[in-house]
Image (spheres, rainbow, N blue to C red):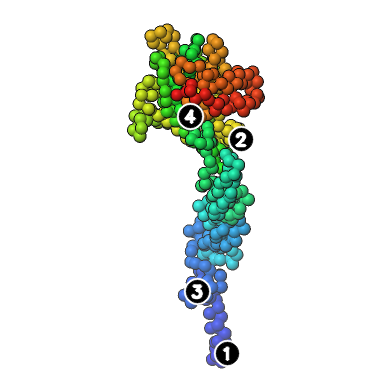
Amino acid sequence: MKSVKKWGPLTVTTLLLVSGFQNCSPVAFKEAEQQLASEKGIVATEKMCELENKKEGELWLSQVGQERELVVCTVGVGNQFNVFNLAKEYRCTNGVAVQTGRTERTPAGKEGLCDVNCGKYLNGDLWFIDIGTSKETLSCPTSTKDTSLVTYSNSAQYKCTNAVATATGVLDKKKISETPCPVLTFNDQDNQATLAYEDVPVNSDSDYDDFVSNIKVIETYSSIGELNKIVIEYAAKKKEAGYKHKLVGVFDGSVRGRDNWVSNQSLFKSEAMFAGNAKIKYELYKGSTLLSSIDNVSRNSDLIIFDDTTTAVDNKLVARITVTELDGKSNLLSVRKGLSIKRYRTLLYVPVQKDVKYAYDIDISDINPSSYDNNGKSLGFFVPADWKTPITQTNILLAYPDFAVHTKFMKDSIQNPALVESDIGKNWFKNVVSKYVN
């Protein structure tokens, strides 16, 4: 009995220990114990190793999420993130996936952009920003005393570089208005000049009233001397000849012909009215009534100004030619050297008719050196005034004695273009014998 009491507790204890070693199945944690183990990183889940196809003791990584790291944009503006995949390491222990405590982070790309644009302007774009207007007073190229007040719109160029807009230093100045400068005309009094023609090229009577037309020309220049506009007006004044005529004008200096006929003056090319292209409009008036018009006259063609000179004189017709949309830079006053009749070539066309077997054009001697009759008399000329014609069949030298000086100058200047005309020659039309003029 004593022996049993003495060893009893030990025996019980031993049995308990033996009993414990005999139970070799995996430990089943109670709920509280499992949570504690998970918090300590011993067991992550009850995921069985067989689901991952892992062997006992094998290690592996399993992705558990992503992590984003903010990156400050050093170029451009905005938010950008480096993205990483996060994984935890597991070991298969007794059929259960157990965290080892090791984690791994691997790059997974970027999110977001560093915006290098400048609003609506892309990186590298150039644009202009309005910086207001300015005014400047310029001397008029057409006058020694007048000035023009010019208003400009100004803008500065900017460039977008990595989301930053900076000025390039380039400025743009555009003219938006100017006070007009005086126009150029043939004379300052009434801008009336005259074209006078003989229509018989052999043994002409030199009274120069076969056809007479007034001509006005107005050239308008900008404050920097660019030709902006030309207006030409022909007013039929007098016709004493019996032949039928047409008055013809050219723009590019070349006479071509008409009615399937090549002009006898086609070989001589004169100075063009203007350089480059332009818009040319023709209008024919009787008083204030518009009789006809052509909106787009070709620069490279002959223009019929008056289709019938008799009708033009009887009805006091006025033809107006307006030239706009000129290339100002190609028509600078500094190059054109003022207004010159040599750019306004106007011919009298005598078509085939009774006593005229072959058609011909009469040019003006101021432009064409061949426009003289068989006796060396001019067949047509320009007068920078509202000229009074000699009485019919009265030689011009009786009415205007100094005309001979002017005629000699015109002939001599053909061989010597630099020749300067004398004052007597320039003003021949002012020395007039009144009894011989109308």
User: In terms of sequence position, does the residue under pointer 1 or pointer 2 come before the other?
Assistant: 1
Q: CA distance from mark 4 to mark 1?
A: 162 Å
Q: Secondary structure at mark 1?
A: helix
Circle 4 residue: 386
Of tags 3 and 1, the one toward the viewer is 3
- Residue pictured at 48% horizontal, 29% vertical: 386
- The residues tagged by marks 4 and 3 sit, at their Cα atoms, a distance apart of 121 Å
The Cα atoms of the two marked residues, 2 and 4, are separated by: 28 Å
Mark 2, residues whose alpha carbon is within 10 Å: few (<14), some, or many (≥20)? few
Give how far apart the Cα atoms at labels 3 and 1 are: 42 Å
Q: Nearer the viewer, residue 335 or 316?
A: 316
Disc sitting over residue 35 in the figure: 3
Q: Which amino acid lies under the numbered mark 1 shown in the image of this protein?
A: Lys
> Which mark is in front, 4 or 1?
4
- Residue at image point 42% right, 31% down: 320
Determine which residue is flagged by label 1.
Answer: 6
Q: Is residue 373 visible?
A: yes
User: For residue 145, what is the image quadrant?
Assistant: top right
Q: Residue at x 58, y 41 (%)?
A: 143
Residue wearing tag 2: 334
The foreground one among 271 and 356 is: 356
* Sequence order check, earlier mark of 3 and 1: 1
3D distance between C-alphas at marks 1 and 2? 140 Å
